[in-house]
Image (cartoon, rainbow, N blue to C red):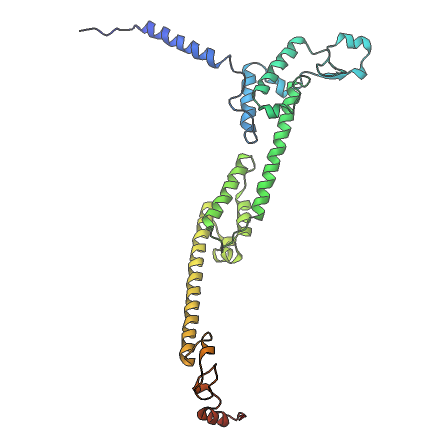
Amino acid sequence: MTRKKRYSYNHYFDFKSVIFKYYKSKMGSNEKATKDQLNNSNFKIWKQELFLLLMGKGLADHISNDKIRKVSGSNLSDEDKTKLQSVPGTDDMFYSKEVTKDLLCKDARAKEFILNSISNDLAENFDFISATTFEIYNLIKGQNECEVEESIAKLKESLKKTKYDSNNDISLAIFISNMNMKFEELKKLKAEVKYIEKFDYLYNAIPEELAIKSNMLTFEGSWEELTEKIIKVNQHLRRLNKGSGEQDQSQANAVSVKNNRTTGYTKEDKHEIECWVCHKRGHKARDCFKNKKNRNKQRKAGRRYYK
């Protein structure tokens, strides 16, 4: 019988410390980019990840402050130009005298993190050689904030124009669900829609009859309770309208059958009937002018009769 090998507490502690050092070396110092690349919908998360990444490297102040100032060569003398370092990629731009080589190296590292955290298509819009980290970050920020404002405006315009047509196959529940999805998108864009705004969008979107029958203007409750009530009222109205439509159709069919029984024939087969009194088509003998009974009735009624 073999004995199981026992490990001491110290041995376990040493093994744990080795694992910790391994993962720390893999995850800590080798980070060169944010977890997710920047796209049209994740700027808020991306800028937070970038800030934390740069803060861990001691470079966060390069995106929050304009640490590297530039001066135009037209404002400098030839002697001053020899003392200052020129901005690479430019013809007549120089760094101010406060800018040191160490500060430029840190700024270059910060720019590298940004470059690795965005797509190649987006990176082509910026000059990473002559521009500073502060300039590049603010260009990205401004561009994405403009896109966010455009997205908010488009969503709100879409909500204003949307109308519910009760004649379509789309149910009101699906229609309201689509509205709620747009409300959620606005919430993600930091433009949360308040209850009164949701109420206005829905009131203008549904038929007036439905708004009146569901007592929207006097309703007191949450948004979920309001939409649930309107959906139920709409279902009742559709059922009642459908029932009245079937009743009207049945009444019309009854009148048609009664008329057919009175005349004995329909409009479609009228031209095929031949009168046995005058031998003309289009009517029966009981309706014929030359029938003696009809002639007596017409005389009693005071009508003129032509032979």
Q: Quadrant of residue 99?
A: top right
**Horizontal side, residue 76 vs residue 45: left or right:** right
In the picture, measured across the screen, residue 181 lies left or right of residue 86, that is left
Quadrant containing the N terminus in the rendered view: top left
Q: Is residue 139 visible?
A: yes
Q: In the visual, does 201 lie left or right of 16?
A: right
Percent across and percent down for residue 262 are 41, 80
Q: Position of residue 265 (x, y in %)?
A: 42, 78
State the residue at coordinates (51%, 22%).
35
The correct choice, above or below, for 245 with respect to 197 in the image is below
- The number of discs equals 0
Please tell me which residue is depicted at 77% across the width and 8% down the height of the picture: 82
Residue 1 sits above or below residue 142 on the image: above
Q: Residue at x 33, y 8 (%)?
A: 12
> What residue do we see at 80% from left, 16% from top?
75
Q: Nearer the viewer, residue 171 or 70?
A: 171
Which of the 4 image quadrants contains residue 57? top right
